[in-house]
């Protein structure tokens, strides 16, 4: 087989079949950390309501650091997809390996920050001393999963950017199995393991991330992807490639940091309403995690496909591609929203919090289900902007939407002290603003001259 034919598979066509072939394996890879998060919360919910409430704070804190890796992941994904579209395959392995060096440096910063500053942040944001101590102990364990998580995310960028997302499933399955087994064993002391309680979920998550990373790197090796991209030949620092990745990723890193920090602000405002509202909001976070999986997979697909076809010189096909992805994404999200509104009790019952809890959470579920539909098309437009390589625009959109989001949250939950369901309408504000700005930017065509 000729060199050109071997590399032809890295270039994609803007068809519904190609969209689904790329998006469905990505959805599996995204589903896994959500399953791990939900599994942790299900087991912790059966300890007590306080543990479930604390898990909401620690989960969002960890997500802030996970967002840094996600920004790096998306920037790298755009670059890899662009090189794949241009058929410059030799550059892909170089970019991937430099991203590993960057991710290890970021994880070291995240670990140090948590050990030295988390206690002050928690002291300012959590009123309950017992909850604060529990959260700090958990985070100082959980944060050691960052190196595994970041490298795991770089691997995702490599496989998705080169149109080989089907291999994501191997790591997904390994991570899920390890997390569920160790959650059950370490939280409650089963299968010969010590009973660690709340912190058992932290150890389980770290082990699961390490297992998922190891399994997929093994798959990359045995499937010949490492050899094809010559990964073993490029283990040295390249400042030009590092600079390119950082220039492309830095706005996305700040974008996700602002986004998740805004969500942490939301949880802090909710915590002022009491433990019950915080526990309900944590279940809503789980709802977003599970029911948003397909939307996020289509968003990642949009990022890659837009960058790839621009690399092929097909800029005029971008808007048509975005509409195709939105139609499929909306089909999934509307179907899931209908099911969620018909059977809300089924979802809420798995957290073991009783009838009163479910009744108070029901109005919030109605609000969140609408937000999920809004997200299903808004995030597609936003990730299409990412795919063009104009990541500075992504950051600007995020700054504006986060500002309005936080103002809404403050006035609704803190100043006017309205019910929790009104607070969750902040998601409507966020996604409608995101859609409006992303839509008009792409329609303007100003992105067509961008070269990365």
Image (cartoon, rainbow, N blue to C red):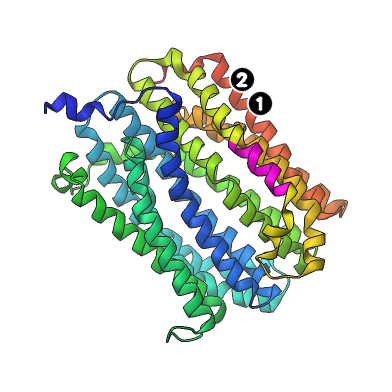
Q: Is residue 212 above or below residue 240?
A: below
| Residue 121 at least partly seen | no
- Magenta region, mostly helix, strand or loop? helix
Q: What secondary structure is marked by label 1? A: helix
Residue 260 position in % (x across, y down): 59, 50
Q: What secondary structure is marked by label 2? A: helix
Residue 71 position in % (x across, y down): 46, 43
Could you tell whether 55 is left or right of 238 in the image?
A: right
Extent of the magenta region: 332-341
Q: Nearer the viewer, residue 253 or 299?
A: 299
Could you tell whether 110 is left or right of 360 in the image?
A: left
Q: Is residue 271 above or below residue 96?
A: below
Circle 1 Cα neighbour tier, 10 Å, few/some/many (<14 / 14–19 / ≥20): some
Q: Are marks 2 and 1 in contact (CB under 8 Å)?
A: yes
Could you tell whether 73 is left or right of 240 in the image?
A: right
- Tell which residue pokes out farthest to the left in this image: 1
Residue 266's disc number: none
State the residue at coordinates (60%, 73%): 44
Q: Which of the image's four quarters has the C terminus?
A: top left
Is 27 one of the magenta-colored residues?
A: no
On the image, numbered disc 2 is attached to which residue? Answer: 440
Query: Separation of disc 2 and disc 1 at Cα?
Result: 6 Å
Residue 280 position in % (x across, y down): 73, 61
On the image, numbered disc 1 is attached to which residue? Answer: 436
State the residue at coordinates (35%, 63%): 210
Is 333 one of the magenta-colored residues?
A: yes
Q: Is residue 344 above or below residue 388?
A: below
Circle 2 Cα neighbour tier, 10 Å, few/some/many (<14 / 14–19 / ≥20): few
Displayed quadrant of residue 23: top left
């Amino acid at each position: 087989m000729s060199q050109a034919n071997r590399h032809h598979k890295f270039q994609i066509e803007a068809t519904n079949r190609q969209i689904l072939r790329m998006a469905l394996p990505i959805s599996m890879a995204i589903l896994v950390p959500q399953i791990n998060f939900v599994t942790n919360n299900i087991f912790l919910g059966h300890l007590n309501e306080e543990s479930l409430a604390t898990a909401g704070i620690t989960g969002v804190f960890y997500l802030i650091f996970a967002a840094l890796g996600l920004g790096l992941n998306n920037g790298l994904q755009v670059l890899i997809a662009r090189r794949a579209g241009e058929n410059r395959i030799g550059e892909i392995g170089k970019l991937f390996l430099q991203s590993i060096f960057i991710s290890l440096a970021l994880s070291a910063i995240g670990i140090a920050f948590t050990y030295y500053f988390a206690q002050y942040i928690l002291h300012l944001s959590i009123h309950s001393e017992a909850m604060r101590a529990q959260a700090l102990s958990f985070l100082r364990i959980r944060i050691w999963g960052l190196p595994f998580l970041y490298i795991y995310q770089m691997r995702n960028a490599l496989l998705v950017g080169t149109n080989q997302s089907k291999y994501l499933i191997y790591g997904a399955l390994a991570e899920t199995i390890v997390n569920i087994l160790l959650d059950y064993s370490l939280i409650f002391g089963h299968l010969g393991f010590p009973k660690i309680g709340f912190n058992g979920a932290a150890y389980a998550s770290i082990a699961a991330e390490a297992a998922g990373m190891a399994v997929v790197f093994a798959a990359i090796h045995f499937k010949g992807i490492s050899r094809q991209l010559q990964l073993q030949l490029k283990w040295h620092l390249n400042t030009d490639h590092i600079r390119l990745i950082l220039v492309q990723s830095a706005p996305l890193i700040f974008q996700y940091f602002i986004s998740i920090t805004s969500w942490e602000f939301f949880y802090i405002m909710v915590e002022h309403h009491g433990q019950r509202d915080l526990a309900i909001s944590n279940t809503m976070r789980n709802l977003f995690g599970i029911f948003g999986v397909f939307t996020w997979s289509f968003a990642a697909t949009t990022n890659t496909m837009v960058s790839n076809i621009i690399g092929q010189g097909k800029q005029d096909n971008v808007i048509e591609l975005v509409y195709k992805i939105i139609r499929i994404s909306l089909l999934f999200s509307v179907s899931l929203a209908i099911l969620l509104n018909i059977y809300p009790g089924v979802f809420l019952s798995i957290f073991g919090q009783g009838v009163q809890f479910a009744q108070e959470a029901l109005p919030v579920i109605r609000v969140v289900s609408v937000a999920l539909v809004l997200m299903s098309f808004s995030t597609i437009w936003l990730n299409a902007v990412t795919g063009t390589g104009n990541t500075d625009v992504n950051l600007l959109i995020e700054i504006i939407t986060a500002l309005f989001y936080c103002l809404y949250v403050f006035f609704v939950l803190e100043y006017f002290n309205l019910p929790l369901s009104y607070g969750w309408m902040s998601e409507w504000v966020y996604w409608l603003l995101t859609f409006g700005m992303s839509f008009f930017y792409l329609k303007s065509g100003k992105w067509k001259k961008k070269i990365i």
